[in-house]
Amino acid sequence: MLRYIGRRLVASALVLLVASALIFVLVRAFGPDPAEARCRYSRSKAACMQEQREFLGLNESLPEQYFRFMGDFLQGDWGNSQRTDRSVAESVGDDLWESSQLAFWGVLVSVGLAVAIGGYSARKPYSKGDSLFTGLAFAGISMPTFWFGLITIHYLTGGLKDMLGTTEPIFYSIPNPVGSGPLEYARELTLPVLVLSVQLVAGWSRYQRSSMLDELHNDYIRTARAKGLSERRVVWKHGLRNSISPLVTVVALDFGGLFGGLIITERVFSRPGMGTLVLDAAISGDTQVLIPWMFVTGAIIILFNLLADVLYGVLDPRVRVA
Amino acid sequence: MTHTPPAPALLEVEGLEVEFKTEDGIVHAVNGVSLVVGMRETLAVVGESGSGKSVTALSIMGLVTKPGRITNGAVSFAGRDLRTLTDKEYRGLRGGDLAMIFQDPLSSLNPAFRVGDQIAEAIRAHSDTSKAAARERAAELLALVGIPQASTRARDYPHQFSGGMRQRAMIAMAIANVPKLLIADEPTTALDVTIQAQVLEVLQAAQRETDAAMLLITHDLGIVAGLADRVVVMYAGRIVEEATLDDLFYDPRHPYTIGLLGSLPRLDDKRGEPLRTIPGSPPGLYSLSVGCALAPRCAFAIDRCRSEQPELRVAGAAADHRSACFRAEELPGLRSEQPA
Amino acid sequence: MSQDLAPLAEVGASGAPVRSYLRLVARRFRGHKVAVAALVVLVLLAGLAVFVNVMSPYEANPIPLTPEILGEAREQPTWDHIFGTDKLGRDMFTRSLVGLQKSLQIGFGVAIVSVLIGVVIGSLAGYYRGWIDALLMRFTDLILVLPALAVLIILASTPEPSFFGLFDFPPATTVTGMVIVISVLGWMPMARIVRGEFLSLREKEFVDAARAAGASGPRIIVRHLLPNAVGPIVVFGTLEVGLAILTEATLSFLGLGIQLPKISLGNLIADAEGTVGTDLAYLVIFPGLILFLIVLCVNFIGDGLRDALDPRAVR
C-alpha cells in the first residue's frame, strides 16, 4: 500500500510538472497580453507596449520565461498583481481560505444529499419518489447555476422577508456586513452553499443511485436479509459501505468542476475567493495572477485525484491488503 | 394428506405458487408445490436450474423480492403461518430458527466486512450479545466448521478465504443461532470437486450439532445419496416425484427421475455405456402448459400427457412414494422394453 | 441487443439494414415519453427562435428607439409583451428568442466541432494503440485536470486571440469565436468514449476480415468502426449541445462572451441583474427560464437517445 501511494505520488508530481508547462504556454499563447492590458489606455500604445514587453520579460523565448517564472514561483516569489499590486501569494492564500469554506460545506451537503437520495431511489426504483428525484436531477443538471443563484436571491432574501414580514432577510445575498458567530455564518453561507450544491447533488445522486442499485442486487444483500437484519441495516450498512468508495472517486474527480461552481457562486453572491480572483484577473489581463492561480488549482485537483486513489484503496479491503 | 412424514412436521408448504413479472411476460416459477419436512429430517429437492427449487426455498425464507411475488399457497413453520407474519416477526425467524446457506460463497459474503464480524452480526441480530462476546462466539463457530486458527482468521476479509473456507463460514453463520431448519441451496455447486465432500461433511456435522432439519436443494443426485432421508424431484415449477431415498434410486416412478438417474455417473457401471442426457431443454415458463410439462421431452409420452395435467399420486409399493405421471405403474415394464 | 448493431458494420453504408436499424431506434425512442415531449418542446422553441424576425411584431434592437417604444418601458408581462419589456421598452420575449437563436447556433456548433475533434483523437488512440494511444490519452487526461471554466474564462477574455501572432482567431465575442473556445475544452469525453468503443470493436471478427481483405487503417476506421460507435457518439453530441449552451450563457453572463447590443441569454440576464429583489425581476426570470427549458429538453432527448441507441449503457 505504501509503495502504491509512493508510486502515485511520483506520477502526480510528474503530471503537475507537465500541467504547469501546459498552463504557462496556454496563458502566454492564448491568454490576455499583459503588455496590452497595461497599455490599454495609453496614448502612444505601440511605444508603451514595446516598453512593457521589455519590462515584463515577454521578449525572451517561452522556455526561458517558463523557467524564470517557475524558479521564482518555487522560491515563493509569486510576484505582485498588475491590477492591485498586492502580493499574489497573499491574495491566493486569503482567497483559498474563503473558497475552502464554501467548498467544504458545499461538498459536505452535496455528498450527504446524494447518498440519501441515491439510497432512497435504489431502494424504491421506479417508484413515485424515485421518478421525482430523477426529474429533479435532470432539472439540476440543466440548471444555469448563475441564474439559479439570482432566482434564489430574489425569492429567498427579499421574497422570503416580505412573505414572513420580518424586517431583515433571513439569508444574506452578500457576505455578512455586520455581526459574527455561528448563526450569522449560517445566514451568510446558506444560499451560496445551496447554489453551489445544485449541480453536484444532481450528478452525484444519479451516480449513487445506480451504484447502490448494483450493490443491492448482490448476493451478500440476500445473505444480510437471511440473517434477519432489518431492511434499514441491510441498505445503509451493507449496501452503502460498498458503494461509498466509487462515490469518493467521483467526488474527487469532480473537483475541477467545483472550481467552476465557485467562480459562478462567488460572482453571484459578491464573495471574495478563488473564483472572484481569477475572474477579475482574466478580465483585466492580469497574467501575474492567472498563472499562479492555475498552478495552485491544478495542484489541488491533482492532489484530490491522488487522494481519491488512496482512499479507494483504504476503503476497499480487496485493494488494501493486496 | 395421504402420507405421514417420519417425524412431526416442522415445515409444511401447501400449494405454493410464485410468479415473476418480466418485460417479456409473467414467468410462472413455482406452480403449486406442496412439501413437508419433519423434525431433524433431511429432505432433498432435486431439479435442474429453472425448475423452481431455489425460488421455493426463498419463498420459505420470505426472501422473494420484486419482480417476484407469491401468488398462492400456505407456508407454515413450527406451527406458525409464515405468510401472515409481519416483516418484523419474519426477521426474528430469519437467521434464527430458519437459516439459509447460498450457492456462491464469495458473492454471498460482503467483501467490505471481516468474516468474523459478519457472523457476529447474525448473532447480535437475534440476541442481546455484546460485540466482544459475539466476536468470540463467531470464532468458536468458525473453529467448529473446521477453520484452523479460527480466532485469527475471523479477522480476515472474505477475499482472503478460499472457496471452501468461505462456504464453511457461511455454514457457521447459518448455525450461529441454532436453527430448527437449515436450508442449503446448492451448497457445493460453486466449489472445487475436491472440496465438495469436505464441505458436505461439515454441513452434516453442523446439522447434527444443532439438531436441525435440513432442506437440501441441489441438481446433483450424488449429493442427495449421501445426505437425504427423502427426496422431492421438481420440474418446471412442479413436484414430479416424491419418495424415500431408497425408493427413488431403486424404483423411480417418473420418466424425469429416470432421466436424472441415467445422467448420473456410476462406479459400478461396467458396460462402458456413455452417460445419458435428457434430450431437449426445460420449457420457458411464460405460460403454463396444458398437459405434462415434460411431455415434449419424454420418450414415454402418450396423448393424454399432452392434454391433461398429471397430479401427484401414490405410485409403487410404498405409501409415501408419489409420482405425477399417468404411466407411473407401467414405467418399470416400459423401461426394460426400451432399447439400451 | 448488440446483435442489432453487428450487421450495420458488415453492410457498411448499403441500404436496407441501416433503414431498419433506424426504424428500431425510432421505435425505442418513441417509447421514452418524456424525451418525445422534450423533442416537441425543443422543436417549437427552436422554430420560434429561427423565425423570430418574421413572427414577432417587435424588434429585438429597434433603432431608433421611438418615443412610443420608450413609453412602454418596464412593463410587467402582459398578453402584448408576455415576458414584459426592458428599461428601454424593448419586448423581452423577442429579445429572449434572439438570445436563444445564438444559444442554439453555439450549442450545435460546439457539439459538431467537439465531436469531430473527439472522434479523430479517440479513433487514432483506439485503433493504433501503443504510443499514439498513450500520448493522446495522457494529453486528454492533462486537459481534464485543468479547471475548465477558469481556462474558458482566460481564453474568452483575450480581446484579439492569436497563436503567438502567427494566426488569428475570431474573439469570443463572436459566435464563431465562442464555438472555438468552448470546443477546445469539450472534446475530451468524446475522445475517451470513442477510444473505448474502438478498443473493444477492433477485436471483432469483421475487423479482422476487413484487415485480411487489405483495407487500410483509415478505411477500417471510417467504414467499419465508426458506424458501430454511432450510438455513443450521437448521445454525447446531444448532451454536449446542452452543456455548450450552459457554458456560453455562463461566459456571457460573466461578461466574457457575446457583448450587448448583440444579444445572448447570458448577457440579457447579466444586464438585468440589478432588478433582482425588485418587481422588475421578470427581466431575469424569463430569459433564464427559456435557457433552463432548452437545456432540460436537450438533456431529456439525450437520455431518450441513450435508451434507444445504446441499450447496454448503464443509466
Image: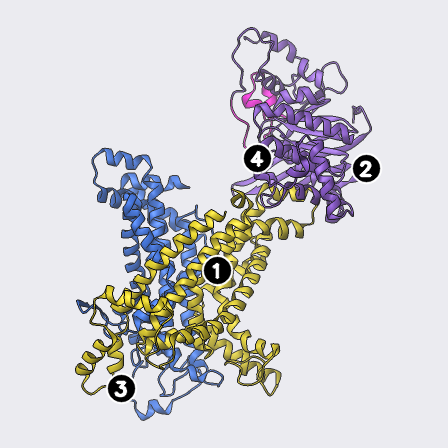
Chain colours: A yellow, B purple, C blue
| Marks 3 and 2 belong to one chain | no
Residue C271 to residue C164: above or below: below
* Residue hosting label 1: A203
Q: CA distance from mark 4 to mark 3?
A: 74 Å
> Residue at image x 50%, y 47%?
A1
Label 3 sits on a secondary structure element that is loop
Task: Answer left or right for A14 relative to B10.
Answer: left
Label 2 sits on a secondary structure element that is loop
Q: Is residue C35 magenta?
A: no
Pick the residue in front: A171 or A105: A105
Q: CA distance from mark 4 to mark 2?
A: 34 Å
> Residue at image x 33%, y 52%?
C138
Pick the residue in front: C94 or B295: C94
Specify the amino acid type for callout 1: Gly
Q: Residues within 10 Å of mark 4 (few under 14, many from 20)?
A: few
* Residue hosting label 2: B79
Label 2 resides on the chain identified as B
* Residue hosting label 4: B287
In the rendering, which numbered label is found on residue A252?
A: none
